[in-house]
Image: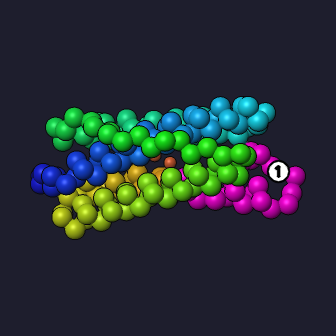
Amino acid sequence: MRNSDPRVPGFLGRALSFEMSAVQQYLTHARLADNWGMDRASSQFRQEAQEEMGHVDRLVARMLSLGVAPNASFLRPVVTGQDLQEVLRANWQLESEIVSLYEQAFHFCARSGDSNGQAFFGELLREEQEHARELERWLTQLTEPGPVAGARS
Ligand SMILES: [Fe+2]
Ligand SMILES: [Fe+2]
């Protein structure tokens, strides 16, 4: 089996910083939604934070398997908002950046013949692409006229 390129730990470290930033942001948004009396939105944000924790866990495991100490080094300040729409836009923006990082990591591994790395990042890429699409659907629901507002059904 071929070893990972030394640049792979760089992608993993950046991903870890992003995922931990997402945990911080979504837990904050859960509390904001509580303050706004939006229970369903709050539990949705909490669930998203849990999913991002799962990604943190997988990145940590991957780093350990490559003999790298997990080293998230930059937590982004949380982007808040005045209402649900604003925080969802901020989350969509964060997810888009995470998707872009996983795309780069996936293509890098593909080009360098690291099939394990490619599979690892490919799975995270698909999950975050789906997460971004879910946020788009939620935003659409909020902005379209209709009875459902404030929570994803
Ligand atoms: Fe994630
Ligand atoms: Fe995500």
The one of 85 and 153 positioned closer to us in this rendering? 85
Q: Secondary structure at mark 1?
A: loop
Asked whether 28 or 6 is in front, the reply is 28
**Residue located 53% across and 41% down the image:** 78
Identify whether 44 is placed above or below 109.
above
For the point 32% across and 39% down, the residue is 72
Closest to the observer, 150 or 62:
150
Q: Which residue is mark 1?
A: 148
Residue 14, placed above or below residue 96: above
Q: Residue at x 36, y 42 (%)?
A: 74
Residue 76 percent coordinates (x, y): 45, 43
105 vs 33, left or right, is left
The answer to whether 13 appears left or right of 31 in the picture is: left
Whole-percent x and y of residue 118?
A: 28, 58
Residue 85 position, x and y percent, is 71, 52
Q: Is residue 49 visible?
A: yes
Q: Is residue 133 magenta?
A: yes
At label 1, the amino acid type is Val
The residue furthest left is: 2
Q: Is residue 52 left or right of residue 148?
A: left
Question: Where, by quadrant of the figure, is residue 63 drawn?
Answer: top left
Which contiguous range is marked in magenta? 130-153
With respect to residue 56, does 86 lie above or below? below
Q: Quadrant of residue 27?
A: top right
Name the quadrant containing residue 44. Answer: top right
Query: Was residue 122 drawn as part of the magenta stretch in this picture?
Result: no
